[in-house]
Image (tube, rainbow, N blue to C red):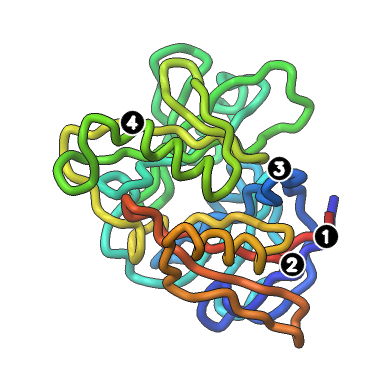
Amino acid sequence: MKMLILICALAPLVTASALWAQLAAPNDAGVAMGHLHLHVQDVDAAKKFWIALGGTAENKLGANEVVQFPGVLVLLAKADPTGGAVGSIVNHVGFLVPNVQQSVAKWKEAGLTVEAGRTPQQAFVTTPDGLIRIEILENASQPQPIVFHHVHFYVGPGAQGGVEVIPEMQAWYAKMFGAKPGKSGQFDAADVPGVNLRFTKSDTATVPTKGRALDHIGFEVRDLEALCKKMEASGVKFDRPFTKRPDLGVSLAFVTDPWGTQIELTEGLTHW
């Protein structure tokens, strides 16, 4: 486990705090999966849900609760989301467990809302507010009870992209964050340490993530300033430019991908 320092810029009213978490080592571009930032109306219910799913509660950060899993931090901010994850560019996220049916039985006993998947090795769990659907897949060889696995993007027609939208998305994440394009089962995908990015075309338009139940995803970056300069040289416009916080020993930036996914980039959440 690695010491984390979570900063106030991650969410309103968040203060610096030491956390333990298991984030993946970065790729050659210095990038790894970092966090999911969720907007929830009932923070206590959300926290209980994520703990029941298999996460570990960490220190409260200002007005936000934190639950950590191997590979990701889940930040819970009290807010009124403008809508669920379904309908936004990030349709859902996914986790791996060693045995789906055993996990399903445990979660049902705990009162979680669980749906069967297409096979016994797949299931879906829904958050208490019904706004985020989580895919559960099986990896019988993994030693941990639950591990973060994927972010699944659904991109709609029209202005969001034409026929080549999926290759464009793979190429953008590869160029910006060193993601490795490929396939994940039937899906076009790209891998960043700690997360499999999956891309699917939607027949209906999807909206940006900002303000939704899943407000943004976060990547942890080694040498964030250099990465931001590289992205700016490629024409990327930041929602919040590279900012140093020497008092906290961290740096951060915000950017939105061309299809509407808000992304927070941090340096200092973990020490590799």
Q: Are marks 1 and 3 in contact (CB under 8 Å)?
A: no
- Is the residue marked by circle 2 packed among few (<14), some (14-19), or many (20+) residues within 10 Å? many
Tell whether 96 sits left or right of 260. Answer: right
**Which comes before the other along the chain, label 4 or label 2?**
4
**Which comes before the other along the chain, label 4 or label 1?**
4
Q: Secondary structure at mark 4?
A: strand
Q: Which residue is most to the front?
A: 233
User: What type is the residue that disc 2 sits on?
Assistant: Gly
The label on residue 271 is 1
Q: Secondary structure at mark 3?
A: loop
Q: Secondary structure at mark 1?
A: loop
Q: Are marks 4 and 3 in contact (CB under 8 Å)?
A: no
Q: Label 3 to label 2, Cα distance in Å?
A: 16 Å
Question: Total number of numbered labels?
Answer: 4
Q: Which residue is mark 4?
A: 200
Can see residue 136?
Answer: yes
Can see residue 215?
Answer: no
Q: Label 1 to label 3, Cα distance in Å?
A: 14 Å
Q: Label 2 to label 1, Cα distance in Å?
A: 7 Å
Between disc 4 and disc 3, the foreground one is 3
Q: Secondary structure at mark 2?
A: loop
Quadrant of the image occupied by residue 236: bottom left
Tell whether 229 sits left or right of 187. Answer: right
Q: Which residue is mark 2?
A: 268
Q: Which residue is most to the bottom?
A: 247
User: What type is the residue that disc 3 sits on?
Assistant: Asn
Closer to us: 55 or 75: 75
Closer to us: 243 or 121: 243
